[in-house]
Image (tube, rainbow, N blue to C red):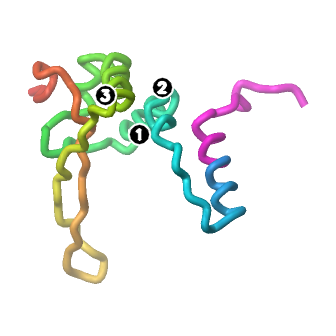
Amino acid sequence: MPARANDACDKTRALQRTLYRAAKRKGTRRFHALYDKVYRKDILERAWTEVKKNHGAPGPDGLTIEAVEVCGVDTWLSEIAQELRENRYQAQPVRRVMIPKRQGGERPLGVPTVASYCPSDCRHSD
């Protein structure tokens, strides 16, 4: 059967499948060398796509998806990758919100920041 555009190999999914299969083969398997995978360009682009698709809300820093797009997604992702490579990346606090439960009451939900880096002029796009 000839290859089609939809058949293009998604390297992020291939990595996920490989890790999944390795973990399933041996339940006690520990993955010690994954950090270098996190800052791969394709992984960061996929993460951005998922955040945007899910309409990610701003965290405590107020950084919105729209603000990142104004500043330039590629530049922003490159800076995050650089911070990760150089072990300078620091996770930011999570915004805590309460969401209603079906049975009544509420449960806490953590909303992480979009990411720690964005030029100061992009922080709050009003």
Separation of marks 2 and 3 at Cα, in angstroms? 13 Å
Q: Residue at x 67, y 63 (%)?
A: 24
Specify few, some or many for label 3: CA neighbours under 10 Å numbering under 14, 14-19, or 20 or more.
some
Residue under numbered circle 3: 83
**Which residue type carries mark 2?**
Lys
Give the side of residue 19 with respect to residue 86, left or right. Answer: right
What's drawn in magenta, residue-wise? 1-17
Q: Is residue 8 magenta?
A: yes
Locate residue 125, reporting x and y percent.
Answer: 13, 26
Locate residue 47, reporting x and y percent.
Answer: 43, 37
Locate residue 59, reporting x and y percent.
Answer: 19, 45
Residue under numbered circle 2: 41
Taking depth in this image into account, of 125 and 31 the one nearest to the observer is 31
Q: Residue at x 69, y 55 (%)?
A: 21
Say which quarter of the image contains residue 45: top left
Q: Is residue 25 magenta?
A: no
Say which quarter of the image contains residue 9: top right
Q: Residue at x 29, y 83 (%)?
A: 103
Give the side of residue 43 with respect to residue 124, left or right. Answer: right
Q: Residue furthest right?
A: 1
Q: Nearer the viewer, mark 3 or mark 1?
A: 3
> Label 3's element?
helix
**Which residue type carries mark 3?**
Glu
Label 2 or label 1, whichever comes before in sequence order: 2
Separation of marks 2 and 1 at Cα, in angstroms? 18 Å
Residue under numbered circle 1: 53
Q: Nearer the viewer, mark 2 or mark 1?
A: 2
**Which residue type carries mark 1?**
Lys
> Label 1's element?
helix
> Label 2's element?
helix
Instruction: Locate the C terminus by quadrant.
Output: top left
